Amino acid sequence: MTEIRVLAVDDSMLFREMLTKGMKRFPDIKVVGVAADPFDAKDKIVALRPDVVTLDIEMPCMDGIKFLHNLMPQYPLPVVIISSLRESVFEAMDAGAVDFLAKPDEMSGNMDAFVGEVAAKIRVASTAKFAFRKDAPKDIKLHAMELGVPADPLDLVAIGASTGGTEAIFSVLTKYRSNMPGFVIVQHMPEGFTKLFAKRLNSSTALRVKEAEEGDEVRPGMALIAPAGRHMRVLDSERGYTIRVEEGAKVSGHRPSVDVLFDSVAKAAGHRAIGVILTGMGADGAAGLKKIADAGGYTIGQDERSSVVYGMPMAAYLTGAVMVQLPLYRIPDEILRKLESRSQ
């Protein structure tokens, strides 16, 4: 078994000790070093060559986000953010981190579940690639796109993603003007972050983006994000498409599950649906995307080179669920192309 070598960067000695001790439970993970600040971290990255770095955001001398901006051009490697500064994690993702986790408010008591989550994030991060950050050729000018006709309220775009998906979804949605059909999105994310993610997208795109709530109507120019810890379904009603948000067991290992969303989209929208599977670990979404395809919808998968983790798109591709596989920078235009072909 190949060990995943980890450097833990955090100004809290208690947290560094807890993480080092906790990772001893996992024979495939070894904390090879710790650092109390970014300057110490950079020296140890050079000396120890870790496979994965865990990183706090709030630290002395230099914050974690600035550290990422300095680190990635010289030493691109997978970084998992573990921080109590929830509103800053998406800046860290934009700076090059591949995943994130909320630091517990207290380090006392039973930390087994948290340590297990960290171990899972480290394993996924160790498989991440960085080619996606150079995905779009420099001579391609990505501009805001819009439909040539008003959006049809019967059209629906469903997106599923996991590791690397926050930036991939951001990359897709920021390319559109507000006359697009409704979007429904599942992004695997820890609880407490989906509302912040929706807020970030809402302030950075021409679409109206919000965390989904029970009874929401899916309207053109709107994107609804499934709340972490709850499944989201699309229902066909007299008012059009509406949202059901519900508790329930994990499906395909997740709650919310992409499969749950895609299955409901296939039933509600059928041939009017476009399903998109983006970067992420595992197979969630593969079965649901196949149902969209079988219902007459159009399906798109992110390609291996541009995926941070080519797990979910690969699983969907291997099941025959993906009609066209594309690099991330081409997906927004392909969605628009398909929508416009329907209106002609």
Image (cartoon, helix red, strand yellow):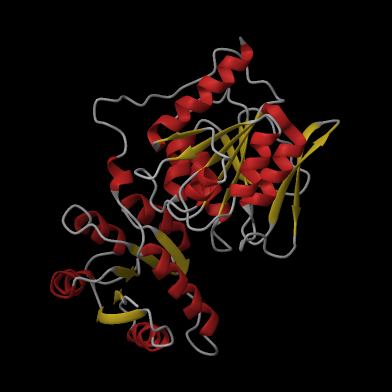
Residue 60 x, y percent position in the rendering: 26, 72
Depth order, front residue of 256/103 = 256
Q: Residue at x 36, y 49 (%)?
A: 94
Residue found at the very far top of the displayed protein: 344
Depth order, front residue of 299/106 = 299
Left/right placement of residue 172 relative to residue 287 reads: left
Left/right placement of residue 120 relative to residue 288 reads: left
In which image quadrant can residue 142 be found?
A: top left
Depth order, front residue of 307/283 = 283
112 vs 57: above or below: below
131 vs 172: above or below: below
Residue 313 x, y percent position in the rendering: 49, 46
Residue 110 appears anywhere in the view: yes
Left/right placement of residue 67 relative to residue 249 reads: left
In which image quadrant can residue 96 be found?
A: bottom left
In which image quadrant can residue 9 be found?
A: bottom left
Residue 161 x, y percent position in the rendering: 52, 49
107 vs 81: above or below: below
Residue 82 appears anywhere in the view: no
Depth order, front residue of 196/49 = 49
Q: Residue at x 47, y 62 (%)?
A: 86
Quarter of the image for the N terminus: give it. bottom left
Residue 174 x, y percent position in the rendering: 45, 34
Left/right placement of residue 190 relative to residue 40 reads: right
Quarter of the image for the C terminus: give it. top right
74 vs 337: above or below: below
